[in-house]
Amino acid sequence: MEILNSIITFFIKRRYSQIEFFMKNPLEAQQYWLTYLVNTAEDTAFGKKHDFRSIRTESDFKEHIPISTYEQLSPYIERCMKGEQNVLWPTEIKMFSKSSGTTNDRSKYIPVTEESLEECHYKGGKDMMCLYVENRPETTIFSGKGLSIGGSYQPNPLNPDSDSYCGDVSALIIKNLPYWAQFIRTPDVKIALMDQWEEKLEMMAQNTMLENVTSLHGVPTWTIFLMKRVLEKTGKQNILDVWPNLEVFVHGGVAFGPYRDLFKTLVPTKKMNYMEVYNASEGFFGIQDRLGHDDMLLMLDYGIYYEFLPLDELGTEHPHTLSLEQVELHKPYALIISTNAGLWRYMIGDTIKFTSLNPFRIKIVGRTKHFINAFGEEVMV
């Protein structure tokens, strides 16, 4: 497995020069994606309605397309879910990431295209390993397996007789992973995608406790449940007695701070690394590129065009967004994205602030619904 570790590490590190390129040329990278997205989608139903063909500049883009919440974009998404194609994006859409409800307590169904899966979600997964290797060149992470706790997926409720399906974004990623990636992860896909949590937890513990697990990936709460069950089944005192080569936990979804001490109890070594990523149903946005720091590199070549809305613009009739070159350090912004999954000027509901402008690094600071607009109303997205 040492040979495999060396081979994978060699190929993973080759991506770093491309990451460095967008770090050094961020505005050019974003301009490329804006042009690509608009040109690619100009003949979609959404593109025709908003006259994408006449968009030539960033100002045109903002003038032609309004900022959208999920409720405002959902009629288009519903058309996609019912099987209509070329609505938001020209290539076939048959996957939808199901995420938490909005203000009306309905689940959100976010389109996932082949492009967004390959150029965003998978690319993010490879890049987090690339950046980890860059930080820890002595790593032996690929001599063992990565343990990830996936969600589940179901038939598309609006088109159940088709091959369209929806589920947690983690489930969509695992279901469509290439064969080579399955070789370096655990548990088996059938177990990872089970929908009954208690049974799934039991099967995962049983199937992973004898593996050489070198990395953990997931939400802190689920990962803690799994580690505790593994310890119960093995009778060991801490997880290093089960997985002695474990070296990193890649986490996202919620703030890690409240769970850090518990992890240190379960994994009692100062050699354990903790790495934050910013990924969601809508895309993969940030990766902690410097272990030991609490910010993340904004990933600028994933098929996403970013805008940033000052919080005092929330709730205004014509909110004015900023592009990357206009942002300031330490000021909170609502994140607005346009993506190769057909989301257009979409407000995902997160607020971020910049900790560095060269390169662009960010921290998640909250949700837009936690901020009050100028009229004293709660802004809910």
Image: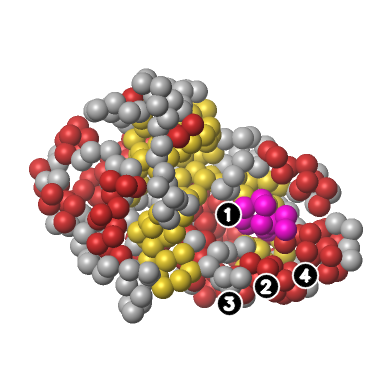
**Gap between marks 4 and 3, in whole Å?**
17 Å
* Residue 359 part of the magenta segment: no
Q: Which of the 4 image quarters holds residue 166?
A: bottom left
Mark earlier in primary sequence (4, 2): 2
Left of 107 or right of it: where is 307?
Answer: left
Q: Which of the 4 image quarters holds residue 3?
A: bottom right
Judged from the image, the secondary structure of the residue bearing numbered disc 3 is helix
The type of residue carrying mark 4 is: Met
Mark earlier in primary sequence (1, 2): 1
Q: What residue appears at the point 59 percent right and 44 percent down from the top-left corner?
A: 254
Q: Which of the 4 image quarters holds residue 26?
A: top left
**Gap between marks 2 and 3, in whole Å?**
12 Å
Q: What residue appears at the point 37 percent right and 20 percent down from the top-left corner?
A: 374
For this rendering, which residue is in front, 122 or 333? 333
Judged from the image, the secondary structure of the residue bearing numbered disc 2 is helix
For this rendering, which residue is in front, 18 or 197? 197
**Gap between marks 4 and 2, in whole Å?**
16 Å
Q: What residue appears at the point 30 percent right and 53 percent down from the top-left corner?
A: 74
| Mark 3 or mark 1, whichever is nearer to me | 3
The residue wearing badge 2 is 199
The residue wearing badge 1 is 129
- Circles 4, 3 touching at the beta carbon (< 8 Å): no
Left of 91 or right of it: where is 60?
Answer: left
The type of residue carrying mark 3 is: Lys
- Circles 2, 3 touching at the beta carbon (< 8 Å): no
Task: Tell me the magenta residue range.
Answer: 215-225
Binning the other alpha carbons within 10 Å of mark 1 as few (below 14), some (14 to 19) or many (20 upward) gives some
The residue wearing badge 3 is 190
